[in-house]
Amino acid sequence: MKIYSFLSSGIDSNVYVVEEGNNALLIDMTAGQSTIISQVIDRFRGYLRGIVLTHTHPDHSGGLRIYREKGLDIPVYVHKIEAPGVREGRIDNLFNMLNEPVPPVKNVHGVEEGDIISIESLVFRVIHTPGHTPGSICLYQEDDHVLFTGDTVFPGGSFGRTDLPGGDPHQLVKSLERLVSLDVDEFYPGHMSPVKGNGWQWIKQSLKIARMLIV
Ligand SMILES: [Zn+2]
Ligand SMILES: [Zn+2]
């Protein structure tokens, strides 16, 4: 499994592409204001089999506009709580991050806790981690101890904010407790740089700080 990291600048989320053989999965889509997402789609287009949104804040989902513009129809996986907003083109333009609204996307698959997203040999388990948003998910690749964390946990002991609509500090702490129970070596957050070793220790640190600050 090869992981390509396209780290964000400005308001965009990071974008990750996980590739094995002729299959690739894209994780998060930026706000769609920069050219990153368009370039990533062009580069991997021939073998891009699916897109996962860790949650639907516009800095992660706005790039779906480009998906539509480029005529893609690959499945978009998102937690079932947040799936209707994507299907119906109701992505909240939080902080006016989007220049243009995101049109409805047809091929949306609502996922939930414990679901497996698998594309040939790429296999990820969906971990539902509410708190930053109600439908935030992390994606866990058990064999390599790799976790994609969206805006639930960041490096350096930080974690996702809970003061936006749908945020819940108590749920965030519970979600961090859940992540600490996983064997995580590397983790790939929605913003900031990936952590390439002892990921669980950093998640533990985030949990410790979250408990002090928000519960
Ligand atoms: Zn974000
Ligand atoms: Zn967010």
Image: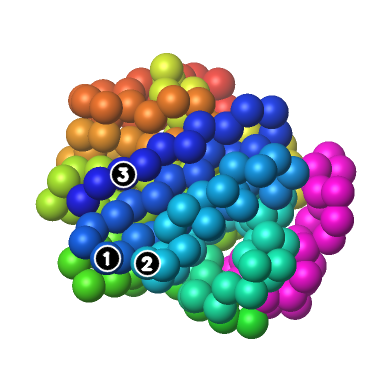
Q: Secondary structure beneath disc 3?
A: strand
Q: Nearer the viewer, residue 163 or 141?
A: 141
Q: Earlier in the sequence, mark 1 or mark 2?
A: 1
Label 3 neighbour load within 10 Å: few <14, some 14-19, many 20+: some
Q: Earlier in the sequence, mark 2 or mark 3?
A: 3
Give the Cα distance between marks 1 and 3.
14 Å
Q: Relative to 83, is 51 on the left or the right?
A: left
Q: Which residue is mark 3?
A: 3
- Amino acid found under the numbered disc labelled 3: Ile
Q: Which residue is mark 1?
A: 22
Corner quadrant of residue 8 = top right
Q: Are marks 1 and 2 in contact (CB under 8 Å)?
A: yes
Where residue 4 sits: x, y (%)? Answer: 36, 42
Give the Cα distance between marks 1 and 2.
6 Å
Q: Are marks 2 and 3 in contact (CB under 8 Å)?
A: no
Give the Cα distance between marks 2 and 3.
14 Å
Q: In the current view of this chain or complex, which residue is farthest to the bottom?
A: 106
Residue 188 part of the magenta-drawn span:
no
Residue 97 part of the magenta-drawn span:
yes
Label 1 neighbour load within 10 Å: few <14, some 14-19, many 20+: few
Answer yes or no: is residue 126 visible. Answer: no
Q: Are marks 1 and 3 in contact (CB under 8 Å)?
A: no
Q: Secondary structure beneath disc 2?
A: helix
Where residue 39 sits: x, y (%)? Answer: 56, 48
Magenta segment range?
81-105
Q: How is the image coloured?
A: rainbow
Above or below residue 147? Residue 125 is below
Label 2 neighbour load within 10 Å: few <14, some 14-19, many 20+: some
Where residue 198 sits: x, y (%)? Answer: 21, 25
Residue 47's tag is: 2
- Amino acid found under the numbered disc labelled 1: Asn
